[in-house]
């Protein structure tokens, strides 16, 4: 086992050292003909159809076990209707919701609600991927920090309650 580890480490380090070596004397073929690309004036760059009002939301500090949601707004700036095919969260703690049946007409907006269950303590950053019009994608990000809620506090002092009455 030690021999295998040693040989693996030796092989990897040899490859790394060789990759850093600048003394390669490989002949480089020079191009004999020059090619020029002619831009097609009729072809326009693809217009962005799905516009996100914002791509990231920071919940800040949230108490553990208290689910939070945020509504992202998406707009169709294209010339044809677009369909949100899928909104995929990176894990089960994040749940996206959107109108799965309705296409977004040009010039209109739709909403994507992203929820986070806040079960795990600590900072989080969760990507949510939107797939639309078959293969196009955009990404939303939610982030924040979940803090552990303290255990139940001490019961109220009965004497204080008597004074209040």
Image (cartoon, rainbow, N blue to C red):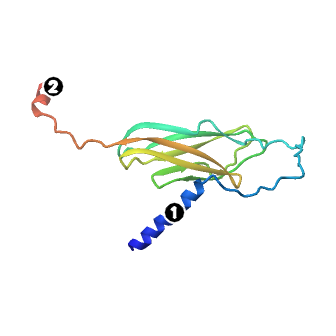
What is the quadrant of the N terminus in the image?
A: bottom left
In space, the residues marked 1 and 2 are separated at their CA atoms by 76 Å
Viewer-closest of 9 and 125: 9
Q: Nearer the viewer, mark 1 or mark 2?
A: 1
Give the labeled residue for mark 1.
Answer: 12
Relative to 116, is 120 on the left or the right?
A: left
Q: Can you tell which quarter of the image residue 23 is in?
A: bottom right
User: Of label 1 and label 2, which has the lower sequence position?
Assistant: 1
Give SS at disc 2: helix
Q: Residue at x 88, y 46 (%)?
A: 36
Q: Which residue is drawn at 81% across and 56% down?
A: 29
User: Residue 84, position in %: x, y?
Assistant: 66, 50
Mark 2 crowd level (few <14, some 14–19, many ≥20, 10 Å Cα): few
User: Residue 103, position in %: x, y?
Assistant: 70, 48
- Image label count: 2
Give the labeled residue for mark 2.
Answer: 164
Relative to 78, is 137 on the left or the right?
A: left
């Amino acid at each position: 086992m030690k021999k295998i580890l040693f040989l693996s480490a030796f092989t990897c380090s040899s490859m790394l050292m060789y990759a850093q070596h600048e003394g390669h004397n490989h002949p480089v073929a020079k191009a004999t003909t020059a090619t020029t690309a002619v831009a097609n004036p009729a072809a326009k760059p693809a217009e962005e159809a799905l516009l996100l009002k914002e791509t990231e939301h920071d919940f800040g500090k949230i108490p553990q076990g208290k689910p939070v949601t945020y509504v992202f707004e998406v707009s169709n700036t294209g010339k044809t209707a677009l369909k949100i095919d899928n909104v995929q969260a990176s894990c089960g703690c994040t749940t996206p919701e959107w109108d799965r049946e309705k296409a977004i007409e040009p010039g209109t907006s739709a909403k994507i609600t992203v929820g986070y269950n806040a079960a795990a303590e600590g900072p989080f950053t969760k990507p949510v991927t939107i797939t639309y019009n078959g293969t196009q994608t955009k990404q939303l990000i939610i982030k924040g920090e979940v803090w552990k809620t303290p255990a139940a506090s001490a019961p109220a002092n009965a004497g204080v309650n008597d004074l209040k009455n």
